[in-house]
Amino acid sequence: MDDAPIARPPATTAKPIWQRPVSRRTVLATGAAGATAAALAALWKGNDLSQILDRVRDYTHGYQGALSTPRARAAHALRRAGFGATSVELDRYAAMTSTTMTQSVLNYQQTSNAALEAQLPTLDLTSDKGPAAGAVQAWWLQRMVQTARPLEEKMTLFWHGLLTSGLDKAGPAQMYSQNQLFRKMALANFDELLKAVSKDPAMMVYLDTETNRKGKPNENYARELMELFTTGIGHYTEDDVRESARAFTGWTLTGGKQLRYTTDSAFNPKYFDSGQKTFMGKTGNFTGDDIVEMLVPLRATAERLSTRLFSFFAYANPEPEIVRHLADTFQQSHYNVGAVVREIFAMDAFYSPKAYRALIKSPAELAAQTLRATGSDARAYGAAVTASAAMGQMLFYPPNVAGWPAGTSWINSSTLLTRLNFVNGATQRMRSASPSATLDQLTSTLVDGNLSPTTRDGLQAFAAAHPTNAAGLLFMVLATPEFQLN
Amino acid sequence: MFSRRDFIKQGLIPVFAGSAVPSVFANGLAAAAADSPNAAPNDRILVLVQLAGGNDGLNTLIPFADGAYHDARPTLRQDQGVLPLNSQLGLHPNLKGLKASFDAGQLAIVQGVGYPSPNLSHFASMSIWETANVKSGIGDGWLGRYLNYLDKVGESPNHALEGVSAGSLVPPELRSSTPVTALQSLKTFRLQPVNEHGTQVDVENPLMKFYGAFKGAGPAPFGALLDATLTEALQASHALQATDASYVAKATYPANSPIASSLKLVAETIVSGLGVRVAHVTLGGFDNHAREKPVHDKLLLELDQALAAFMQDLQGHGLGDRVLVMTWSEFGRRVKENGSAGTDHGTAAPMFLLGAPVKGGLYGEQPSLSALDNGNLKFTTDFRSVYASVLQGYLNAPASDLLGGTYEMLPLLKA
């Protein structure tokens, strides 16, 4: 993977957009220009001067060189690559160079997760019906909170949101086993992952490949494979959907259990449609793997997956130049997802002002980061799973095959109140034995010490007025708008 | 505390929805407000029921007298207990409540509803229905635009409860610069105070300040979104807490039915006089590519029982005349069943309009089962005609401005 050729722009051109560090001065100037324009616009509308000055302060505060300190960079990287960091972790990562930190996050196979595995409850994987849905959900949330390999868990969440299956059709043991597949292949080659997912029991139930047989084609999986998992709409025809559905015949669930509970699949030639299929202009006796091998090399797939990964880790709507570079990386590395993720973390764009707090914490992220701040016991995970659902994200139960719409859709009046009330409940349940941190320590660890002056003043006032209420103060920090963002 | 109008004045509207109101549409609104003195809004309520996943229209409104139906559906056909509406068409056997409404003249069924060049992707087609933009599916929701219009003409009750959805997400058809409230329960819709040794510390004011101070910060418009959302949430929660909490359902809603719980929550919100104008509920699970019959039968039963309880409840509260229910789904299913005893994605399907405001009956034309397009029905009524008829004929809003075009009006509704 490390030896894979990486596309480089011609040497004669200017530095590419993603490798242009933005100086503190540039940010100041840009921020000030924006603020000036806003102030002028406000004056134009007849607002009074003090209001305008307040707004100038609010537009410019805090973001100049927000990521200029090693600790802030580490905190940003660990929010994105994982589920936030404790003070101790921040100290450890802040002492590394960016390159070393990225290596450490990416090469997580070298980090033992034995402590987590020892803590996890045992799931019933032997009985006919397997574990209860709630047990598997709590198990995963606990992994997010306690893992020593943050990126492994974060990529698992990424795949769950892209290559979706859900408990509305698949059973808990199937979802568990798919989740382990995502974890095992978190940074694998995309074609290999898709081939495995095509035969994964949860997916076979969720998108009906288990019923897809010779003479009885079922289009569900073939359509979503193209529309959602690879090229996106506009790169295939309805005929391609119908023909490729035939290629995915032959795989069946085995093991004699009820459909929702079986976690084994096998190829049965009797059910395979071995006739000629014409797919995207080529004709042959294609299998499902053949279809995957035709879809993954397409430029549309490379660009779509690159956009999705960058938007997941850095910010939405990446510049075309960035997408082009990541898609090149993907295509030149045998479709290696790890290579693309490595490039994203190496980009200055990843640490740019544009990336800072440019994502809204998803409910799972908010829940896991909150529990990392409050400490947690076995019961906390189940409560967090329930709260996450009320915030709009029930793990293993995406709203439909497109996954969660994410972004601004996480925030509406109901989900915002639920987020604040969840955080409140979590801090109330804190063990009184938890060491109480000072306000500076809390804000430094949880929000990079980077708050609006109003919020900083407000938190100090709360701390002064409620000196014995450590849980209340932690709530106030976790309830800030800054903490809602990633 | 800022009112929504303050936000509007400050030009912060677009961040609510993440996209600016298209200028062509903004002009349309201004024109509508200025030129349509007759378009006075009213206090009527529209409840949208989304059948998510693509409802099998042919097994909902069943062409039981057509041999082609029986040929195309060897395992899925309903051949017993269909509730006939005439000599050709009948309702699924589980739609007994809707049949009773039809007989009472309170159910209008529009047949073969769709749009040109149908898209067989769930998400592309949903966006088309949600935005009424058949070209790209991009833009504000069609009912979001209606709520926006209410704001502009100054007739809106002016708080975030005029548009509500049951659940944790705001559906795209309600999205615009006008905020909409997602409700999961009226009781829990409040900010919990902080506990301090058994006493309660109110944190609304400090948090409002924090969010207000953050609203212009950051590279993305999330600060403004968070601030506006908290403001709206607290306003709505105050309205909910101030309201008479004496709602008692005047019907028995089915237990263990999410759609019934959603409709009950909507009924509670309406009965409590919170100023709801548009409500949205979702019943999912219609994407039945395999083993469709038991699943679809159960879904229609749930839908029918939940709607019957909802209508009875509203009538019991004397609100039946003010509420119209309309169902929609992103598409119907393929005419011929597939080899998995299911159906793949299709095109046209019927829509139901239910309640005292409708003129009951069958509208439009049942699509032919033999003249197909790639195995799919050819639509006979454009969904935008239905939207236009509801906007103009029921909500008294300028349909052509809100839909960006003029569509045939169907006489679905009483004046």
Image (tube, rainbow, N blue to C red):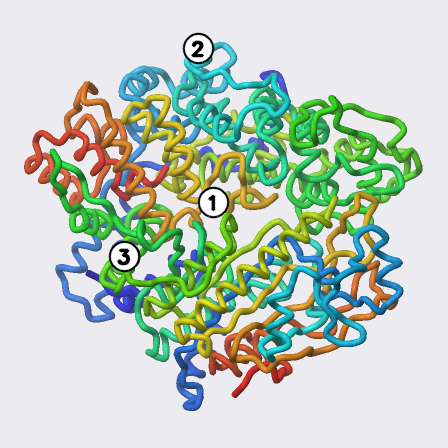
Do badges 1 and 2 share one subunit? yes
The type of residue carrying mark 1 is Ala
- In space, the residues marked 2 and 3 are separated at their CA atoms by 44 Å
- Of A191 and A159, nearer the camera is A159
The type of residue carrying mark 3 is Ser
Q: Is residue A346 visible?
A: no
The type of residue carrying mark 2 is Ala
Q: Residues within 10 Å of mark 1 (few under 14, many from 20)?
A: some
User: Mark 2 = which residue?
Assistant: A118
Q: Residues within 10 Å of mark 3 (few under 14, many from 20)?
A: many
Chain of the residue on which disc 3 is drawn: B
The residue shown at (84%, 26%) is A268
Q: Position of residue A2 (x, y in %)?
A: 58, 16
Chain of the residue on which disc 2 is drawn: A
Front label number (3 vs 1): 3
User: Does A79 sit left or right of B287 as displayed?
Assistant: left
Q: Secondary structure at mark 1?
A: loop
User: Mark 1 = which residue?
Assistant: A406
- Of B252 and B1, nearer the camera is B252
- Tell how many labels: 3
User: Mark 3 = which residue?
Assistant: B237
Q: Quadrant of residue B346?
A: bottom right
Vertical comparison of A248 with B56: above or below: above
Q: Quadrant of residue B245?
A: bottom left
The residue shown at (21%, 43%) is A452
User: Does B221 sit left or right of B355 as displayed?
Assistant: left
